[in-house]
Amino acid sequence: MLCDHMVTLGVYGLIIKDKKILIDEDENFLQMQIDSNRESGACSSVGFACVLIALYVSFYYNVIIAWSIFYVYCSFQNPLPWTTCGNYWNSKNCQSNSTNHQTNHTFPTDEFFERYVLQLNKSNGLDNIGLPDYRIMICLLITYFFHFMILCKGVRSSGKAVWITATLPYVILVVLLVRGVLLPGSTDGILYFITPNLSRLKDINVWIDAAIQVFYSVGAGFGVHVTFASYNNRNKNFIRDCIITCLVNTFTSLLAGIVVFSYLGHLTVIRNGQNIKNVAIQGPGLVFSIYPEAVSKLEFPSFWAIFFFLMLISLGIDSAMGGFEAIITAVTDELSQYNYFMKHKKYCRYVVTFFAVTISFFFSLPNITYILIIASFISNDELIYESSSVGTFKYPVWIIVIGWLISASSILAIPLYAIYMYFTFSGTPRMRIALMISPEYEHDQIKKNGVAERLKLKHWISI
């Protein structure tokens, strides 16, 4: 998987990142955002899609930050609540003794996450999703409060916050790395992570997973790069910035992987030589079940647990901040055509930021019920592409339909808005298409001469 990640990042990640920033800096405004309605015709539909995607991701991404805040709160208890069985949320299969496990046993860390944090055992299906959990809802409110305070003043406030949210995780990672490599079994875990398995290069699913991770990691399609690039100078060396950020992205992934697998290697020793393949699970279980178990075996476990989850909170806020900035900037740029907004731009920024985080908060609430609906459909590739079930649970048809509607809505924004633009113009079909694909400042010339440069093959070849 590591080899696939490197190749995919070099082939796709850097190229896409270059193109997205070039699009914006070449015109020096948010050409691909909603504001491009007046500048690039039908291309603004891509801006709508970017904003929708960024908004959808915020619905479940911030829930993960809320989980991390809740884990920080629980980490102040002694002993850590996920280290013991016998609690009211534990099942009869829970066993904390690593030397005596029955066949169908469960670990206390797994049950703490699934039965205490998520409370999945309280629902028997999607017909009984329950009310939002007030504990996680409070943590979610704290998360969105952070977002509002960071983003309400624009890049002036968010730029200062980045100095903390972008640097603190590296400090914590280095500290965790130093502690992790000193643990018994850490070498085996690190070797498992960095040793290539060339036979898996023939598996197309490995390449698909690598591509998904790279696209998500570099933020392609979220409108974030286009938004931040709009604040650059016209002569900014964006190619250098793209290379640096992609290299830092790779370095961070390697560093985080080494840190995680050093602790996973130690966990295999604690579990009496359990195969690391069974320990290194995918998804949120790795962060909220496996890793907490590993740090709970260290001296001063509460300290290391707080340290780790503070890093997750910092990383989460830093990443989510970019998506919100793309949404807020797109809306404020659209409103800038109105004189009232320009006269009260500072206060309107507060209002737009408030509505953005409020809308995201209320649509995040279904994700803190007993059944995580939206997160399942947006982030669970197995559910969407392979089957209509997860484990032994089979999703009803109406939920599958909702999932596809959510997934397709951002894509449908592109053709639907293009059709809308087509009927807003008058003239022959050729004239309408010419006006659709041309910026507004060319419209008068096109109507006068009846010729559009963008309909000529030479124009597209020159690009």
Image (cartoon, rainbow, N blue to C red):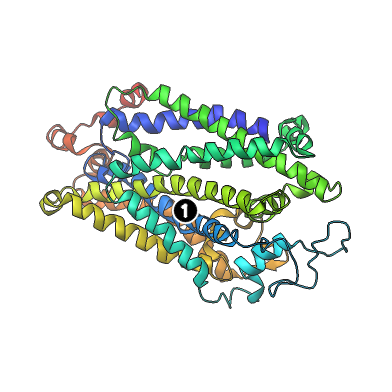
User: What quarter of the picture does the C terminus occupy?
Assistant: top left
Residue 283, percent from left and from top: 64, 52
Which residue is nearer to you in this view: 61 or 93?
93
- In this picture, residue 225 sits left or right of residue 196: left
- Left-right relation of 77 to 218: right
Give x and y (percent) for residue 395.
Answer: 63, 68
Pointer 1 local density, CA inside 10 Å: few below 14, some 14–19, many at least 20: many
- Residue 317 position, x and y percent, is 45, 49
Above or below residue 71? Residue 339 is: above
Count of residue discs: 1
**Residue matched to label 1:** 57
Q: Secondary structure at mark 1?
A: helix
Identify whether 258 is placed above or below 139: above
Q: At 49% from the left edge and 56% from the top edge, which residue is drawn? A: 407
Q: Which of the image's four quarters has the N terminus?
A: top right
Q: Residue at x 46, y 32 (%)?
A: 16
Where on the picture, by quarter, is residue 259? top right
Q: Quarter-wise, where is residue 93 in the image?
A: bottom right
Q: Is residue 414 visible?
A: no
* Residue situated in front as seen by the camera: 294 or 284: 294
Q: 60 or 423, which is in the foreground?
A: 60
Q: For residue 115, which quarter of the picture?
A: bottom right
Q: Where residue 359 sits: x, y (%)?
A: 36, 62
Which of 158 and 458 lies nearest the eye of the viewer?
158
Whether residue 352 can be seen here: yes
Q: Amino acid at mark 1?
A: Val
Q: Residue at the location (40% across, 44% down)?
A: 322
In this rendering, the answer to whether 252 lies above or below 303 is above
Q: Is residue 171 left or right of residue 26?
A: right
